[in-house]
Amino acid sequence: RKEVEQDPGPFNVPEGATVAFNCTYSNSASQSFFWYRQDCRKEPKLLMSVYSSGNEDGRFTAQLNRASQYISLLIRDSKLSDSATYLCVVNLSGNQFYFGTGTSLTVIP
Amino acid sequence: DGGITQSPKYLFRKEGQNVTLSCEQNLNHDAMYWYRQDPGQGLRLIYYSQIVNDFQKGDIAEGYSVSREKKESFPLTVTSAQKNPTAFYLCASSRQGGAETQYFGPGTRLLVL
């Protein structure tokens, strides 16, 4: 079983739509959680950390559900510039980071 | 500007050749990492280093070697023992090891001739 699993998509949504991604993790001892954004043939860039209480940054909201072992990312009012691959990252302990394969999002005009 | 740089952007390797990928950071970060990304797969850890002159193997270290002689630099050598080296190689750093946020360099794309 993979440490981190994501629906690869692709998600194709119209501009202005709300879209949500989920990511499940297998190890209940996981400590820290992140969402990264990766554009085609570029490096991943931190979108936001995910805190137990949930957190919001503009149009982006991240949630953590430890009981069900998943994290989510909600994007409201999608923009064309949101088109990218979104990576879920889980830190188990120390330097053990596990990356999901990514969810592809295309926002359509 | 502070950040992480990787060079070259593209690298071609001949059969049996060792090649070295450069990674430099001026963020004063203690920890540095090397990952490999293949299509349809998540990033996989090759090596990491939490402090100068010390490094540990990640999940896929076979066929690779690293050094950490300076805090700013963490070069990766892809040896001839790595039979499937074609991939996108990403270097990252963080303030310390552990759960600190990682920041990535722009990557090096390695292709085998």
Image (cartoon, coloured by chain):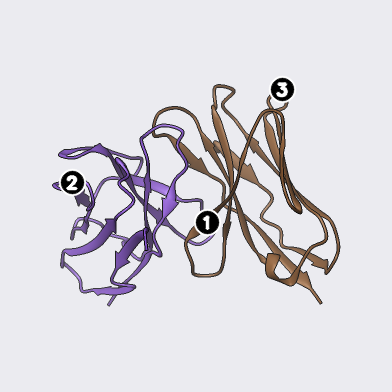
Chain colours: A brown, B purple
Q: Is residue B95 visible?
A: yes
Left or right: B56 as drawn, with respect to B88: left
Mark 1 residue type = Lys
Residue B24 in picture, x, y percent from top left: 27, 58
Crowding at dot 3, Cα within 10 Å, few <14 / some 14-19 / many 20+, comes out as few
In which chain is the residue bearing label 2? B
Residue occupying image coordinates x 47% and y 61%: A43
SS under mark 2: loop
Chain ID at mark 3:
A
| Few, some or many residues within 10 Å of mark 2 (<14, 14–19, 20+) | some
Residue B100: name its quadrant. top left
* A92, B50: nearer the viewer: B50
Q: Mark 1 lies on which chain?
A: A
Which numbered tag is attached to residue A29? none
Residue holding disc 2:
B68
Question: Are the residues under marks 1 and 3 on the same chain?
Answer: yes
Residue at 28 percent across and 45 percent down: it is B61
Q: Which of B72 and A35 is in front in this view?
A: B72
The residue wearing badge 1 is: A45
Do discs 2 and 1 share a chain?
no
Q: Classify residue B26 as left or right of residue A52.
A: left
For disc 3, the marked residue is: A67
Q: Is residue A1 visible?
A: no
Please state if A73 lies on the left or on the right of B24 as rendered: right
Find residue A18 and report its horizontal and vertical position in percent.
84, 56
Q: Which of marks 1 and 3 is in front?
A: 1
